[in-house]
Amino acid sequence: MATVPSVSYSITVRLEVPAGGKAVSQLTHAVESAGGVVTALDVTNAGHEKLRIDVTCAARDTDHAQAIVDQLEAVEGVVIHKVSDRTFLMHLGGKIEMKSKVPLRNRDELSMAYTPGVARVSMAIARNKEDARRLTIKRNTVAVVTDGSAVLGLGNIGPEAALPVMEGKAALFKRFAGIDAWPICLDTQDVDEIVRTVQVIAPGFGGINLEDIGAPRCFEVERRLRELLDIPVFHDDQHGTAICVLAALTNALRVVNKSIENVKITMAGAGAAGNAVLRLLMAAGARNVIVCDYLGAVHQKRDDLDESLRWIAEHTNAEGYAGDLRGAVKGADVFVGVSAPGILTGDDIATMAKDAVVFALANPEPEVSPDDAREHAAVVATGRSDYPNQINNVLAFPGVFRGLLDAQAGGVTQEMLLAAAGALAAVVTPEELGPNYIVPSVFHPDVATAVAAAVRESAGGRARGFTEA
C-alpha cells in the first residue's frame, strides 16, 4: 500500500453542487481532510442553479479513494454522479495499436503494399531469408513473451491478467527506443510448450523478450531458446535488472569511494533476478558475496540445493556462513535486495559498515523502509518512483534491444550486459553524481542511445539503414 497519495490511485469524481453557497470552496477541503490531494478541479457544465464539476484527486489505495468519495458526498448539497478510476480508463481497449507505415490511398499503392506487388518481395525473401530483416518488420520487432506465472509482485495470475503488463512493456519499447514490440501471452506453463511456441513464431521477430516467467522454469526456457534461435533472447527480469543494479552500484561505490573488488556484498533473493544480478556483479569484479534466500545464507553444506543454488554456493560465501540475513548484513558494505518486503529494519542497516550502500528493490514494499535505511546508509536505492535513485528496468531493456536489433545480433553475451551497465552508469556525469543521484531518470534523453551504442559496439555491429530495394 502506498504511504502517500499516488497518481496510480487517481480518481475523477463527477458531481453536482448548488451554483450558490459554499459547496464549491468546500470540495478541496473535503478531499484534503480525507488525506487526498486535488490535482484538478474543472467546471464542465454551469447553470443558474447547479454546477457540474469534475474533481480529480490522488489517493493512497482503493479504500482511501472510496473514503475521499464519501467525504465529498458528505458536503452539503453535493450529488455524486460518477467516479472514474483514471488508471482503468487509461487501459480501456488496451494501450497499444498497429498502424500502417505506408499510405494506402489508391489502387497503385494497394498493389505495391499487397497483391500483386508484394509477391516479388516474398519471393526475394524465399531466395534469401536474411532479406526478411531488410524488407519486413522483423528488423525492428520484439516479442514480449510471458506465461503469466510471475507477474510483477502479483505472482501466478495467468496470461490474461498479464496482458496489461505486457502491453505496457510494448509501449515502453516504442516510447524509449522506437521498437515495435508485441505481447505474446501463452496459456501454458509447460517448458516444452513455451519453448516450442516461441521457436515457431520466431521468424516474425528480431528479438525475444522473456517477461514474468517464474523461476526456475525461466532459466530452462531461456537456455533452450538461446540454443535454438538465431535472434537475441533476453530475460528482462534477470538481465535487465542485473544491468540496472550494476550501473547503480558502480556509481554508488564512486560516491562512497569504495571498489567492487573490495566490498562485502550481502544479497537477499536467489531467484531469477538475484541469480542474474549475482553473476553480473561477479563478472564486474565482486569477490566477497553472501546470498540469502528465505532459509538463510546459501552455503555448500545445505541439503536443499537445486542446480541454481548449488552454483551460488560454489561461487560465493567462501567462509561458509550459515546464519540468517540479519547476521549476513553485519559489517557488509553493500546490501542488494531482490526478494520480499520488510525483512530488515533500520537497526539491521545500522550494523553494516561505514558508508553503506542499500538497494532495497522489492516492489511495491522494499526489504527495509527507505526512510529508516537512510538514517544509517550513505546511499539508498529502491524500485519505487517516490524516492530518489529508482532502479527501473526501463533504463536498460529499450536501449539493449535497440543495440541488438541495429547490430543484427544473433544472441546476447555477458560482455554486452557489462557494456550496457557501463554506458548507463556513465550517463550520470561526475558533476551530477551524488547520494541521491546514482542513476539517471528514465526520461533522460541519453539513456537509450548510450546503452544502444554500447551494446551495438559490443556486438560488433553498427546502426544500419535499410532503404535499398
Image (cartoon, rainbow, N blue to C red):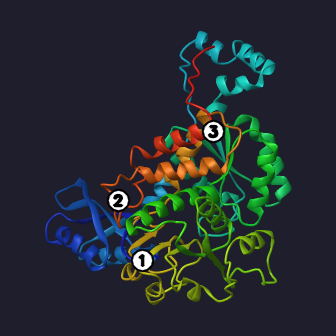
Q: Identify the amino acid type marked 1.
A: Pro
The 10 Å Cα crowd at callout 3, few under 14, some 14 to 19, many 20 or more, is many
Residue on which disc 1 sits: 370
Outermost residue, left direction? Answer: 21
The 10 Å Cα crowd at callout 2, few under 14, some 14 to 19, many 20 or more, is some
Q: CA distance from mark 2 to mark 3?
A: 29 Å
Outermost residue, front direction? Answer: 262
Q: Is residue 93 visible?
A: no
Please give the label number shown on residue 459: 3
Give the left or right position of residue 265, taking residue 3 as reference: right
**Element on which disc 2 rests:** loop
Q: CA distance from mark 1 to mark 3?
A: 38 Å
Q: Residue at x 65, y 70 (%)?
A: 155
Q: Residue 292 location in percent, x, y?
A: 64, 79
- Image quarter of residue 355: bottom left
Using the image as rendered, state which of residue 195 and residue 75 is in the foreground: 195
**Element on which disc 1 rests:** helix
Q: Residue 184 location in percent, x, y?
A: 69, 48
Q: Identify the amino acid type marked 3.
A: Ala
Q: Residue at x 24, y 70 (%)?
A: 27
Q: Residue at x 17, y 69 (%)?
A: 25
Q: Residue 170 location in percent, x, y?
A: 57, 47
